[in-house]
Image (spheres, grey):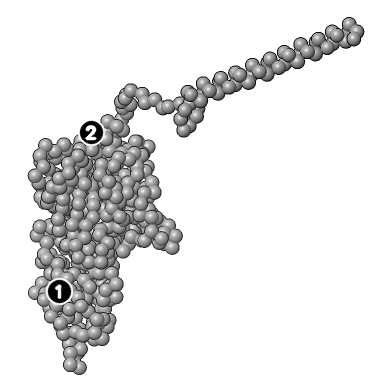
């Protein structure tokens, strides 16, 4: 072997030895590293580091402070009904699927939301029912502000406070259907913490807002959002002319009714009253009655047990209808209230107002529409005088009108002729599928029924014989016609007993004719004399 070959062979052996040594070192290092790692990561999730919990630090903010401050003032109201409230009076509220079929307007989806499972009240077929609502303590003496539809027709009210497992009995102090508000007083609970009252006139669109209540029965639920709009009205519903809502997207759901809407100072600026929804649940559109309105109603109730509103005895056209706008402009005004009807013997007739007048001012201030006129008149004490500026035949005239009591001028208005709950005449259920009550003296007088008779329909059960006859709450039954032993008989109805007596004479298949007085618009318009006839079904006795 030559020298060169020996050098090459030596280099190859050296390289091979070096390579073997390196490989052996890598293998030994891998084994050692794996053993150490296996000993260190002897768990189900290799490579996972345990989580460390930091020391508790209170991260306070405005919402937290408001919730802590106001929660003790918000109560859960449990309502027990002796019988299921009728739905007939609220048929204007479409089912969740009716929206697209009815034009999709907001009123089609308007929902009361006292029942934690949706709807307005208990959904059982009959007998005792229960539902839940909310309320807010406004006086340490136990006075609570809530919605009228929460307590309406309640046989028993029980109140629960946050952190207290006891249920306390409560009584109704007074209600106001026109604003859907009620005042109740809890008994047996001491050291109550009233919520602070704010000023809803200061609320601006875009302000933060919080709602607290018991949606679906979950006590002291806090949600937040903003004020989406102000002065929302349901223009096609005449029973809500005194309700101008704050709109919010704070999540409110069935069971929130009567709970507070709060500003960022923890002050109550509204009472949560309703939602607009296709499903009956939260969709970002909730309505709260401004606290300024609620406070005025509360003050009247604790003073008088009811709300006394003023009226000047007129009925007017809805201001934003095209025909009304045209009539107002034809009179020479850009805005105002077009007088449709002047009540006979009422304050306006006595002062000289006529149908067709356009009211453009009150007490020196312009009248922009019906709401501004109503707000001013109803806030004026009965017996005081308001100065009206009227356009008649293109000329301005001034009239001094003495404000009267709305309940006396319009006793037929929904709720106006009904006494307080404590003094309400007992409604009688009759087998036609309705409940009826005697006529009040005021209503008899207004309908010229003094010395005659009649009964008023209070509720109509859906899918009943009375429903088939298209009877409505507020209708007045004057007589019932039927055939007895082949002879037509007309029984004048002077009392509830007359209706019950006629029913005992009827059998399935008999023809019945009811003479009634009906009013299409609960707020205004003439009463019409109508007859409703049908064949008696198999009535329960």
Q: Which residue is mark 1?
A: 454
Q: Is residue 129 visible?
A: yes
The relative height of residue 177 versus residue 208 in the rendered view (above or below) is below
Please, what secondary structure does the residue beneath circle 2 have? Answer: helix
Q: Nearer the viewer, residue 540 or 474?
A: 540
Numbered circles on residues, count: 2
> Would residue 299 appear left or right of 526 to someone viewing this image?
left
Task: Specify whether 222 is left or right of 541.
Answer: right
Instruction: For marks 1 and 2, give the one nearer the viewer.
Output: 2
Depth order, front residue of 68/515: 68
Marker disc for residue 369: none
Instruction: Give the mark nearest the N terminus, 1 or 2.
Output: 2
Q: Quadrant of the C terminus?
A: bottom left
Q: Residue at x 68, y 15 (%)?
A: 22
Does 128 sit above or below residue 495? above
Check disc 2 and report the residue beneath it. Answer: 69
Q: Place residue 120 in its image quadrant.
A: bottom left
Name the residue at 14% across, 77% down: 500
Camera-nearest residue between 439 and 324: 439
Quadrant (top left, top right, bottom left, bottom right) of the N terminus = top right
At 11% from the left and 64% from the top, the residue drawn is: 425
Q: Residues within 10 Å of mark 2 (few under 14, many from 20)?
A: some
Q: Is residue 10 above or below residue 513?
A: above
Is the Cβ of the residue at disc 1 closer than 8 Å to that at disc 2? no
| Secondary structure of the residue carrying numbered label 1 | loop
Per the model, the C-alpha gap separating discs 1 and 2 is 54 Å
């Amino acid at each position: 072997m030559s020298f060169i070959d020996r050098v090459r062979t030596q280099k190859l052996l050296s390289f091979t030895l070096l390579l073997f040594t390196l490989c052996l070192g890598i293998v030994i290092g891998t084994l050692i590293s794996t053993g150490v790692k296996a000993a260190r990561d002897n768990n189900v999730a290799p490579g996972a580091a345990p989580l460390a919990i930091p020391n508790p630090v209170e991260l306070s903010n405005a919402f937290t402070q408001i919730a802590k401050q106001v929660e003790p003032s918000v109560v859960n109201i449990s309502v027990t009904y002796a019988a299921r409230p009728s739905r007939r009076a609220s048929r204007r509220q479409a089912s969740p699927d009716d929206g697209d079929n009815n034009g999709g307007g907001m009123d089609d989806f308007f929902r009361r939301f006292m029942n934690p499972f949706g709807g307005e009240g208990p959904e059982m077929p009959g007998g005792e029912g229960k539902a839940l609502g909310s309320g807010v303590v406004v006086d340490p003496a136990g006075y609570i502000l809530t919605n009228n539809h929460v307590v309406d027709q309640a046989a028993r009210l029980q109140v629960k406070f946050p952190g207290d497992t006891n249920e306390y009995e409560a009584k109704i102090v007074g209600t106001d259907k026109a604003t859907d508000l009620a005042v109740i007083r809890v008994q047996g609970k001491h050291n109550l913490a009233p919520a602070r009252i704010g000023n809803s006139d200061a609320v601006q669109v875009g302000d933060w807002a919080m709602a607290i209540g018991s949606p679906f029965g979950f006590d002291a639920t806090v949600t937040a959002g903003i004020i989406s709009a102000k002065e929302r009205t349901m223009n096609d519903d005449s029973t809500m002319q005194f309700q101008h809502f704050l709109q919010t997207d704070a999540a409110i759901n069935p069971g929130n009714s009567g709970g507070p809407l709060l500003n960022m100072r923890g002050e109550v600026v509204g009472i949560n009253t309703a939602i607009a929804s296709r499903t009956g649940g939260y969709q970002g559109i909730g309505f709260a009655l401004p606290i300024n309105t609620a406070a005025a109603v509360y003050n009247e109730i604790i003073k008088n047990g009811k709300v006394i509103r003023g009226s000047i005895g007129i009925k007017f056209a809805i201001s934003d209808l095209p025909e009304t706008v045209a009539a107002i402009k034809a009179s020479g005004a850009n805005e105002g209230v077009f007088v449709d009807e002047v009540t006979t013997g009422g304050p306006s007739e006595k002062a000289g107002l006529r149908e067709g007048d356009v009211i453009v001012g009150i007490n020196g201030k312009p009248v922009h529409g019906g709401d501004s006129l109503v707000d001013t008149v109803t806030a004026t004490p009965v017996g005081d005088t308001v100065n009206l500026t009227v356009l008649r035949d293109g000329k301005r005239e001034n009239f001094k009108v003495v404000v009267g009591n709305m309940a006396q001028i319009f006793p037929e208005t929904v709720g106006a002729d009904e006494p307080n709950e404590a003094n309400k005449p007992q409604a009688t259920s009759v087998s036609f599928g309705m409940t009826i009550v005697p006529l009040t003296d005021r209503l008899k007088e207004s309908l010229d029924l003094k010395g005659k008779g009649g009964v008023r329909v209070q509720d109509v059960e859906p899918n009943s014989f009375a429903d088939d006859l298209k009877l409505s709450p507020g209708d007045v039954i004057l007589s019932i016609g039927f055939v007895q032993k082949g002879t037509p008989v007309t029984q004048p109805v002077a009392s509830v007993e007359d209706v019950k007596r006629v029913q005992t004479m009827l059998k399935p298949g008999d023809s019945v004719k009811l003479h009634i007085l009906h009013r299409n618009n609960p707020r205004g318009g003439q009463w019409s004399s109508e007859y409703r006839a049908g064949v008696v079904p198999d009535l329960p006795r």
